[in-house]
Image: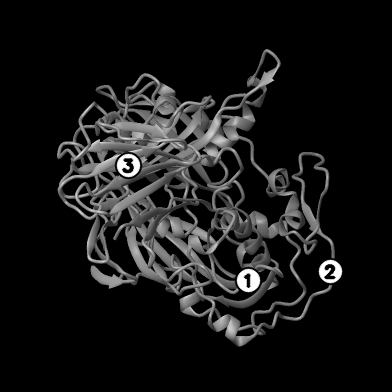
Amino acid sequence: MSDEDIPRRDYLKLAAFSGGIAGLAGCGSLEQEASEATDGETATATATETSDPSPAQIPEVRMETADYVGARQFDNANYERIHAHRKQRAIETLLSDPDVNEIVSDWIGGFEVYEVLSNHLETVSLQGPTNLSIEESGFPDGEEAEFEITAENRQTVYGLIDRHRDEIVALEITDPEDVSWTKTQSPDEIEIGQMIHETDAVQDAFGDVTEMSWYPSWKSAGGGFTGLGQADLQHGNGATAVMYVQDGDELRIISAFIDGSGDEPEIVNVVVLDDAVEYPLHEIAAAIEPTEASVLDAVPNVPMAQRPYYTANGGYHRIEPPEESFEQDSWSIEWTPAEYQGATISGSYEDSPVFEAMNTPITITGYYLPPREGRNTREWYFPDDEPVFNGDLMFWDVHGTDFGGPGLIGKLDFPATGDTPSGFQLKSHYHTGAVGLESVDFHSGVRFGPYNYDIAYEFYDDGVFSPVFRRTGPGFVNQFVNKVQANDDTYGEDGNYEEPVVQHYTSTQAIDITPGTEDGVEVELFDGDEWTTPEEEFYVEGERGMIARFGNPDGSETVDVPLDGDMELVVVQRDESEIGPGDATAQRLEDEETPSELYHPAQYVDGDSIQGERVIVWLLMIGATNQMPHPAGTTNFTTTAQLSLSGY
């Protein structure tokens, strides 16, 4: 079976990784049974009847004092676990309310947001429209094609969930509204669109697409952002295109890969999918038997301060960035808005410099790779040390305000709790590839292709600071999940079975480090047994017990970077011709005329000296999302690092 033969997936398959709805909850509040599908019918879910409990009542002080919490306030990696586990359960709990279930069941697409609060509460929002209307002009004969898209009756549901009891303790539903955006196509894009329409995959699925309601949503035009290893195309010579087609009551997706290396574009592959994500909200709603009575009028509304930032403002972002220069918890922070590499931050601690600039130049996302087999990410992604990806598809994503922003949206303050001192988080959000600052298409559930990144930095009064990377998807993951399933009979060899890696992330954090000095640093590396002093630039895989230390040669200040198996480190001399985090280095540009030469930070390691020099530290935070299913939308994948200061 080829990857063009994409089967429709069923929400009941959640049981494959969660043990079913009741099993995931840890208590049998919703027990599910799957009836056998007969005569081509899809299996359906029914829930055992339970008595409807009275609305949850919790002390007012518990509700009023619940606030956002930081990664450091959890033990035993529970911050990562709670985002992987509880988001789905919170969504299911919200959908068990009959008023919510009725609304969401009628949506054609959805967008879900989840955040962890203190006091064992969590906040979740669900958002989607009932229909997509599209007005088209100029395709295929005009100088420009224009598509006016309206997501009709978009609503947002807010809920606060008691995560120990799986109960709704606050609930609010907004009034329906229509949300519109515009997409245009140039003559070249019109030509490619016609080529896609004429492919067998599209003809077999739809016939003549121009007789249907459709519009093009382009993930990327190529440039320095897309790599099509499937066609052996080097960085920048491939592109992707996404189209949405209204097919009866369903919103279906055309995903195309394009070879742009020659004088004329060529279609590499086209796939038709039924859903943007593995488990759409309306399918989850249909699989849940709601309770008899809604708690909408029996519990409080959800206050603005406790809604998820992404949708808090009536379905739009709550954007409340801090002053661009401020002091708090012994830190002095300056930041500048995101262009293409995320918000750039500079920091000092106790009036002594820590880093001149820190940001996120790239999030690398790879699909359908061969098994890793112990290789570092440079060897695995690019085994020939050239910018041709060792899989089907790779993105070198940017993080900006115009290409699916909005960027830095707020500062969260954390009081001291237990052994954790007071601190704060600078929270950023990026929908790379979505429409505009508010990502109106993505937030309306039209989200195949673009991404959902939460990139945050936490700072604490004891000199600890932490990058926090969170991915929700979807990107193209549903396409490759289905490709693996469609081709699973081809992965056996010599009695062994080994699937490709569906998806793998690397979040790159670049730091122009200044430990108490702006004149150059001393670099040490502890491998778990002994300290060494590397003289030249290096690239190393993290192992348990490993530490990289950056110190002031003429003072006591140091910055320690503990490394484990989820991280890699690149340390290079600062070079104005190489991409880095601040004004002293080169920057990525969205509209670059030639493909970017950067494919992996390790390519900058070329033997330059680092002792006593200004260096750029690339902390590569690995996202092995393939090892445990993290379905797009219904789970958050989270990874963190923790850097610590001494001698300040």
Quarter of the image containing the C terminus? bottom left
Residue 73 vs residue 110, the one in the foreground:
73
Query: SS of the residue at dot 1?
Result: strand
Please name the residue that numbered disc 2 is placed on. 50
Disc 3 versus disc 1: distance between alpha carbons? 38 Å
Amino acid under label 1?
Answer: Ile
Amino acid under label 2?
Answer: Thr
Residue 249 vs residue 588, the one in the foreground:
588
Q: Mark number for residue 161?
A: 1
Q: Mark number for residue 558?
A: none
Q: Position of residue 636 (x, y in %)?
A: 54, 53
Residue 490 in view: yes
Q: Is residue 112 left or right of residue 319?
A: right
- In front of the other: label 3 or label 2? 3
Q: Residue at left 32%, top 41%?
A: 618
Q: Position of residue 401 (x, y in %)?
A: 29, 57
Residue 149 in view: no
Q: Which of the two labelled residues, at mark 1 and mark 2, occupies the earlier sequence position?
A: 2
Disc 3 versus disc 2: distance between alpha carbons? 53 Å
388, above or below 560, in the image: above
Q: Which residue of the protein is positioned furthest toward the top in this rendering?
A: 494
The residue carrying pointer 2 sits among few (fewer than 14), some (14 to 19) or many (20 or more) residues within 10 Å by Cα, namely: some
Q: Mark number for residue 618?
A: 3
Query: SS of the residue at dot 2?
Result: loop
Q: Which of the two labelled residues, at mark 3 and mark 1, occupies the earlier sequence position?
A: 1
Q: Which of the two labelled residues, at mark 3 and mark 2, occupies the earlier sequence position?
A: 2
Q: Residue at left 29%, top 32%?
A: 534
Give residue 204's quadrant in the image.
top right
313, above or below 204, in the image: below
Q: Residue at left 51%, top 76%?
A: 175
Amino acid under label 3?
Answer: Trp
The residue carrying pointer 3 sits among few (fewer than 14), some (14 to 19) or many (20 or more) residues within 10 Å by Cα, namely: many
